[in-house]
Image: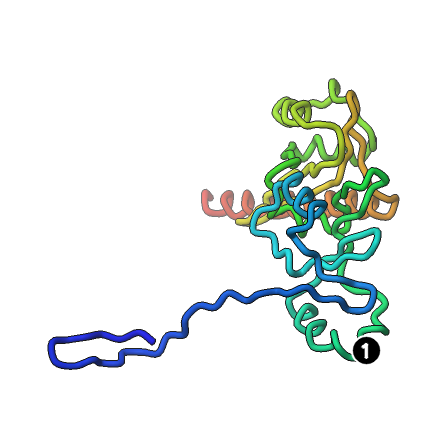
Amino acid sequence: EMCIRDSTRTIEEAKVPRPTVREHKPLAVGQFARVDPTIPEIALLQTHFGLKDFPMHLLYATKTKVLLITEVVNEFLEIIAESSISEKLVNMGVAVFKKCKDGTYRITQEAARYVLPYVTKRVVKCSVEELKNFANKLSVKIEDIGDEIAKKDIEALSDGTFLLFAEIKNNSSEVRIPAVVSKTASTVTLSMSKKNLACLRINLMTCLARSFHNLIIVKAVSYTHLR
């Protein structure tokens, strides 16, 4: 409660609930278990990608992947955890990290757009033209990358997967389009399935078309005002 005191009495101004920090305890629901951010491999994952303010309590793991769910689904899981329904749970959420053969994790293309706002390491911004070039060629030698700033950022990274993204202006906002790529000593290659590659290309074309359409409208309006 919040009170205001004067010289003679205490006046109860308003009842303001104290902020509470909710504890998310370990939880197992069928084959899925809530990720424990303190275990070494998960702590390493956070450090590797520089995950900042990421809602770790929304991550549930299986033997081969880590899934991201919504707050609503998370609350539902907490309700059914002790019931027989939990054993019937087959699938949920979207696979956000997948375990590699060496025991490390990589970001999946399906969840790249959800993870991008939280990643502070192993993420590189490039031009739209450069991302289109990757989407068309699939694999590009580092020395052939045209975006010089992106090229230097990529050269500074150690080998492995990272997020490459471009920004496209759409009305008053900017749309970020990410792609999961893998770097070796001299080459950068898109790391995704044919289905996800097709989705990336469609996404690029759609966003560019909308941006061009909006630009034409703005120019038409400006021309009308000038007449």
Give the answer, above or below, for where 59 lies relative to 183.
below
Q: Position of residue 92 (x, y in %)?
A: 79, 64
Given the image, on which type of amino acid does mark 1 rest? Answer: Ile
Q: Is residue 207 above or below residue 82?
A: above
Local secondary structure at mark 1? helix
Quadrant where the image shows the N terminus: bottom left
Q: Position of residue 15 (x, y in %)?
A: 35, 78
Q: Residue at x 65, y 32 (%)?
A: 127
Left or right, 44 with reference to 52: right
Name the residue: 64% across, 22% down. Answer: 152
Using the image as rendered, state which of residue 55 and residue 220 is in the foreground: 55
Total numbered circles: 1
Name the residue rendered at 75%, 77% in the picture. 82
Residue 151 figure quarter: top right
Q: Position of residue 11 (x, y in %)?
A: 22, 80
Describe the colour scheme in one phrase: rainbow
- Most extreme residue toward the left is 7
Residue situated in front as seen by the camera: 48 or 91: 48
Label 1 Cα neighbours within 10 Å, binned few <14 / some 14-19 / many ≥20? few
Q: Which residue is mark 1?
A: 85
Relative height, residue 137 to residue 75 (above, below): above
Q: Residue at x 37, y 74 (%)?
A: 16
Residue 226, percent from left and from top: 45, 43
Q: Quadrant of residue 124?
A: top right
